[in-house]
Image (cartoon, rainbow, N blue to C red):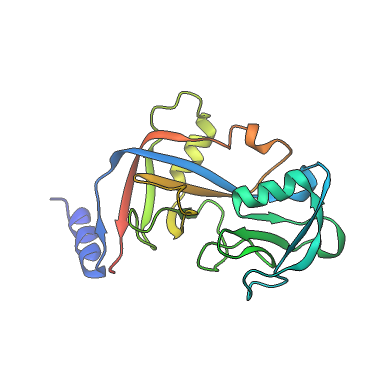
Amino acid sequence: MRPSIAIALTALALSGCTAEESEPGWEATVYYTAVESFHDGAPVEVTGCPTIECEGGDDPLGSYPEDFVQAVEDEGTGRITSGDHAGEYLNWSYDVGYWLDTAPRNSHGDPLRPFASAAADPDVLAEGTQVRITDCGDAEDVDPEVCDRLQTADWTIEDEFTPGLGGDRHIDLYLGEETGPDFTESAWYTTLTNARLETQNGPR
């Protein structure tokens, strides 16, 4: 065994972490922060919580394009670009509803990190698990630039799926803000099938 590998494995053992070999058969989807100015549709009055410290609120939170409101519910977060709350975030979760915030949030209330935060069901990958994508899998329509960016990122499981949307061998990768209109039609809104993942679990 080469000394460098021996040292690395010793350090890993002392840290209490366990590295697992790269495994195929994973589905990797993506999610993002919607941006109001990239959406249109009839204005929709949104009610909910004026702060993160609230559940099931019915305060008026503003009026936003229908497509934006739907994107927030689909993705969990959106940046407001007009009106009294411009610069704030309209967030949504199944157990809270809509609320205003200063950042896009994961299911634990922490800020989401672009090309770092990932979601999984907790019985599939535990919170804190580090993930590397080592192969983008079988999908023929994955753009090479997108594949390379997803592979070079260091992902950490910091978020959980809305119940019913996850499943075995399924992770969701947070990209940050959408970069233009019709983002879901762009190469970045992709799904990796039969991808190969390498995971490293910390001590539980």
Estimate the x, y position of residue 7 in percent, counting from the top left.
21, 61
In-front residue for pair 135/186? 186
Estimate the x, y position of residue 71 in percent, counting from the top left.
67, 47
In-front residue for pair 114/25? 25
The residue positioned farthest toward the top in the image shown: 140
Residue at left 37%, top 56%?
Answer: 130
Residue at left 56%, top 47%?
Answer: 31
Total numbered badges shown on the rendered structure: 0
The residue positioned farthest toward the right in the image shown: 83
Residue at left 84%, top 56%?
Answer: 82
The residue positioned farthest toward the left in the image shown: 1
| Viewer can see residue 176 | no
In the image, taking residue 24 as reference, residue 142 lies left or right, namely: right
Estimate the x, y position of residue 165 in percent, counting from the top left.
47, 47
The quadrant holding residue 49 is bottom right
Residue at left 32%, top 52%?
Answer: 199
Q: Quadrant of the C terminus?
A: bottom left
Estimate the x, y position of residue 124 in percent, counting from the top left.
33, 53
| Viewer can see residue 14 | yes
